Image: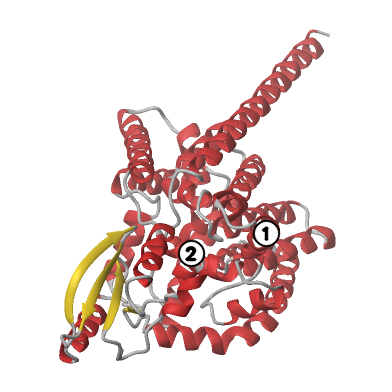
Amino acid sequence: MWIADRMSGLAGTFQSLMRRERLWIALLCAVYAAVLLWLMRLLPFWLDEVTQLAGTTQPTFGAFLGYHRYNAGGVPLGYLLQFWLISAFGLGFITARLPSALASLLGCLALAGLGREAGVRSRAVLLAVFMILPIQLRYAVEGRNYSHGLLFAIVATWCLVRLDRSPGVGRGLLYALAVAASFYSQGFAAFIQPGQVLTLALTRRWRSFAYAAAAFALALLSFVPWYIWTKSGWQQTIATLALRFEASPHVALVLLREISGDGWAASLPLVAGAIYGFRRMERRTGLLLAGGILSGVVLGLSVDYTYHYFFAVRQFIFVVPALTLLAVYGLLEGRRTPVWAVLVLLFLGGALAKNYTYFSRPHEDVAVAARLLLDTAAQSPCIAYVPTDDPRLYAVFEPALAQHRCAWPPTDASIAFASNIHSEEGERRSALAALAAAGYQPGEQRQAGGTTVTLFRKPR
């Protein structure tokens, strides 16, 4: 009788803690949603966002799909909600950025579910760490598709862990759908899956491996038609932009330093904590998460190298949930030592300082730059651009600019020449040298939103 009473009391205490945990998660998500709504209106649109908006502001669904045929690596699912919202309500901060915020919020909930499967003692701590990660928070409030890929990468891993616990057709199909959604949201998001599936074979969980491998193959096959349709367009764009991948040890160092989105201050504690957490976590889950991290990095770098695409840390954001989960597991299960305290404080200080700096410093503003160009068009017959720049991005905000583009080389007596902070310096200098050789002389210069416009005239 005493034993039964004790067990009943322990069960009640556990249920109370679980209810409290759910309340903490709900409170965190509510605060996080409010922060995202505030942040998404704080910063102006920048070049990468406008590159995506050039596709999602297309007038028809057919034109929307056609744009991604030449948008290197572009896949439709991560852009679709933004396209519908802009079509229905017009272009604005909310319609452009709300899909990313929603994906990030749902990703947090999915990570809580994955954390429960992995045995993380406090999912509230896991979510708090994930929410303040600079690389995650930045893309949660940008009109890009990285948060969508991150969401489905987490969901796919969650589905795989559940499939491994209890293999079956239903769970296999759910995993296949999640992986397919990863491919169609942001291709790099699916690169963590081969490594995770392979760990099932390496640890001889053959039944789980058979279901997972079949599900992954099915998801991969679903992506083949899109890849065949877009491959030539992607390659044409990469060749036109003269993008390149520079293989060197420096790439690995940059990836390690910037994987948190901050620098060494947050990245070193994150990676060190993940290594410690891997050593303490249940072997089957720890290996699965580590296999996904390794696979995501190796396949991502391999694709950049194969297609001569440029390296960017954001391509590897999809390994961050596994790193976070392992690090938080190690944090909660490890011994509280002075080193432990230093790592925690270093991470918190680095992440919070980076977030404050990023959201408070001045940023480029393509919309303001577009208004400057439109004002300039009233003073000059046409506007010339650095050859590798895409003037269509300014036309997203001021469509009339499409009518004011100079032929190259220009022949008018006076022109305006535009360059921005992303313009290739060599191309900019070559263009200015060509104008000087043609007899143009620089005059008034104006700047706005990260774009510089210089008026040029030929002496009579």
Q: Looking at the image, what colour scheme do you see?
A: secondary structure
Residue 200 in percent (x, y) is at 64, 62
Can you identify the residue that label 1 sits on? Answer: 81
Q: Earlier in the sequence, mark 2 or mark 1?
A: 2
Q: In front: 358, or 182?
A: 358
Q: In the image, what residue occupies the spot 74% across and 64% down?
A: 177
Does dot 2 land on a helix, a strand or a loop?
helix
> Looking at the picture, which amino acid does disc 1 mark?
Leu
Say few, some or many: other residues with alpha carbon within 10 Å of mark 2 (under 14 / 14 to 19 / 20 or more).
many
Q: In front: 233, or 386?
A: 386
Does dot 1 land on a helix, a strand or a loop?
helix
Q: Quadrant of residue 240?
A: bottom left
Q: Please, is residue 170 above or below residue 343 in the view?
A: below
Q: In the image, what residue occupies the spot 52% across and 83% down?
A: 234
Residue 197 in percent (x, y) is at 63, 65
Asked if residue 297 can be seen in this view, the reply is: yes
Furthest toward the front, the residue is 460
Q: Which mark is residue 146?
A: none
Position of residue 409 in the picture relative to residue 331 (left or right)? left
Say few, some or many: other residues with alpha carbon within 10 Å of mark 1 (under 14 / 14 to 19 / 20 or more).
some
> Looking at the picture, which amino acid does disc 2 mark?
Val
Q: In the image, what residue occupies the spot 61% across and 42% down?
A: 115
Q: Quadrant of the C terminus?
A: bottom left
Residue 209 in percent (x, y) is at 70, 66
C-alpha gap between disc 2 and disc 1? 16 Å
Can you identify the residue that label 2 sits on? Answer: 50
Q: Quadrant of residue 157?
A: bottom right
Position of residue 257 in the picture relative to residue 289 (left or right)? left
Position of residue 202 in the picture relative to residue 14 (left or right)? left
